[in-house]
Image (tube, rainbow, N blue to C red):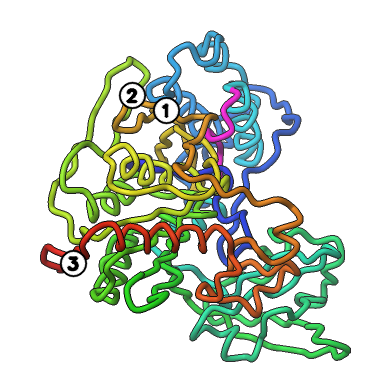
């Protein structure tokens, strides 16, 4: 087994507002186990050694049982005797698939949706997201109102864009498979693949059907989706996740691009989270004092992380949040709110206040285990409660249908004909007004601190 990476991966990770075809991952569903006479177990172990997997199904299961025993944040294990699972399937696991199903069943007993098993494909997806590089064609997809697979947007300078895919294209077939009834994850599973392999798409565009043969490549993932000046004084950054190791590097680059800004809007709407240490690093870009976050482990031990007090941005700050803002994004908004560094505008956040450890297992699969809960600097436990904005701007279904919601989400699911500075997005418009008011009521503050 390999070491752990502390993470804030939310259940809704990359599930809000469409998905990249190279990144969705889901845990398998627990199912019945295949029984095996115990005297067959040694032969199974030999079989797995010959195939290059240096563990047996029983050992894999035992490893996960031990990880949960040592690390799970609730030492009552949700009110059960954890030892009852230790030998439950001993000698009954025929292969790795049955071990995986047993692990899923065991983890399900904890009643924690964030503690979950990931098969090798799902674990590799998660690892690649963290490394900010995935294999695919580079296109964001979603479902339209008729539940058809639709292109939201091809990512700039990727095979999808170069091949000519456009927003609002309907993906009708993938390698000869009709996409009728597909979920976003279903479509993503068939489109992604090995580097330099090809995928055949049949696309509907208006009344035409077009065929595309696209070669898959490594796709760099960006966390900072948009950086621009909304006018001569107010800058805007949309940060879509904290999953990449490069989040803070991207944020520093974005702040460099907005050197002339006298006020800043940081958009964390629909940001489902990512890595704990990156949410701390991003918070540190704005804080000149105070704490960022505290974690509390299974034994009640509290660890507090203080700000480095070396901000590179000191301008008035407005943070946009909504119910899709979760986990690591809530750490950042909580730190900025509790330290009176920013005004929060929008709707109450998701409310995920748990920390996961990411564990790679010997067969290439993995398991995420909730190892702690976290508190904001004011010791607020936000789990299943969320963080309320300072200024609430509610979005009704009617407003969304009228195109008044997040500017990058077209009400028809195509992502077209929207830009932030048109201010049809009523939450962004309110944040902009707050930023302008801050400038009018306070002398302009320039960015300070040395940018690496």
The tag earlier along the polypeptide, 3 or 2, is 2
Q: Is residue 114 magenta?
A: yes
The tag earlier along the polypeptide, 2 or 1, is 1
Residue indicated by mark 2: 296
The magenta segment: 111-118
- Left or right, 254 with reference to 445: right
In the rendered structure, find residue 446 and report the number of the disc placed on it.
Answer: 3
Instruction: Name the residue nearer the viewer: 262 or 416.
Output: 262
Q: Nearer the viewer, mark 3 or mark 2?
A: 3
- Left or right, 29 with reference to 177: left
Q: Position of residue 13 (x, y in %)?
A: 55, 50
- The relative height of residue 275 versus residue 170 in the rendered view (above or below) is above
Residue indicated by mark 1: 67
> Is residue 50 among the parts visible in the rendering?
no
Q: Residues within 10 Å of mark 1 (few under 14, many from 20)?
A: some
- Left or right, 144 with reference to 26: right
Q: Assign the N terminus to one quadrant of the image.
A: top left
The tag earlier along the polypeptide, 1 or 3, is 1
Q: Nearer the viewer, mark 2 or mark 1?
A: 2
- Left or right, 442 with reference to 451: right
Q: Position of residue 12 (x, y in %)?
A: 58, 47
Q: Are marks 3 and 2 in contact (CB under 8 Å)?
A: no
Instruction: Name the residue nearer the viewer: 428 or 376.
Output: 428
Q: Position of residue 34 (x, y in %)?
A: 73, 31
The image quadrant of residue 183 is: bottom right
- Give the alpha-carbon distance from disc 2 to disc 1, as whole Å: 18 Å
Kindly state the secondary structure of the residue where label 1 is placed: helix
- Give the alpha-carbon distance from disc 3 to disc 2, as whole Å: 37 Å
Kindly state the secondary structure of the residue where label 2 is placed: strand
In the rendered structure, find residue 202 and report the number of the disc placed on it.
Answer: none
Q: Nearer the viewer, mark 1 or mark 3?
A: 3
């Amino acid at each position: 087994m390999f070491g752990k990476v502390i993470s804030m991966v939310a259940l809704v990770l990359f599930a809000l507002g469409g998905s990249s075809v190279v990144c969705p991952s889901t845990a398998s569903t627990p199912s019945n186990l295949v029984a095996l006479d115990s005297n067959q177990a040694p032969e199974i172990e030999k079989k797995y050694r010959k195939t290059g997997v240096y563990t047996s199904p029983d050992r894999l299961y035992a490893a996960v049982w031990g990880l949960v025993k040592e690390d799970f944040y609730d030492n009552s294990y949700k009110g059960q005797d954890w030892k009852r699972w230790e030998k439950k399937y001993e000698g009954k696991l025929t292969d790795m698939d049955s071990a995986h199903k047993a692990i899923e069943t065991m983890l399900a007993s904890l009643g924690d949706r964030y503690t979950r098993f990931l098969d090798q494909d799902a674990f590799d997806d998660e690892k690649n997201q963290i490394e900010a590089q995935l294999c695919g064609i580079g296109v964001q997809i979603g479902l339209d109102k008729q539940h058809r697979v639709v292109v939201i947007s091809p990512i700039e300078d990727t095979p999808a864009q170069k091949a000519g895919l456009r927003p609002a294209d309907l993906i009708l077939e993938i390698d000869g498979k009709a996409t009728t009834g597909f979920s976003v994850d279903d479509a993503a599973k068939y489109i992604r693949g090995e580097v330099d392999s090809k995928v055949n798409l049949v696309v509907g565009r208006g009344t035409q059907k077009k065929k595309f043969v696209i070669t898959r490549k490594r796709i760099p993932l960006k966390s900072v989706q948009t950086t621009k000046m909304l006018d001569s004084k107010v800058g805007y950054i949309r940060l879509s996740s904290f999953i990449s190791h490069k989040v803070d590097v991207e944020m520093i680059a974005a702040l460099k691009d907005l050197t002339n800004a006298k006020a800043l809007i940081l958009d964390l709407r629909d940001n489902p989270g990512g890595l704990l240490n990156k949410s701390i690093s991003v918070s540190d870009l704005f804080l000149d004092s105070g704490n960022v976050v505290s974690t509390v482990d299974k034994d009640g031990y509290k660890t507090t992380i203080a700000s480095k007090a070396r901000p590179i941005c000191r301008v008035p700050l407005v943070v946009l949040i909504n119910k899709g803002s979760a986990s690591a994004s809530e750490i950042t908004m909580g730190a900025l709110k509790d330290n009176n560094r920013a005004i929060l505008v929008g709707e109450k956040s998701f409310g995920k206040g748990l920390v996961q450890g990411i564990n790679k297992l010997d067969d290439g699969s993995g398991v995420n285990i909730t190892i702690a809960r976290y508190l904001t600097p004011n010791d607020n436990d936000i789990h299943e409660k969320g963080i309320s904005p300072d200024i609430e701007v509610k979005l009704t279904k009617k407003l969304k249908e009228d195109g008044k919601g997040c500017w990058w989400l077209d009400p028809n699911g195509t992502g077209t004909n929207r830009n932030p500075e048109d201010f049809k997005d009523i939450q962004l418009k309110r944040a902009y007004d707050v930023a302008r008011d801050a400038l009018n009521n306070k002398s302009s503050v320039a960015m300070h601190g040395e940018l690496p």
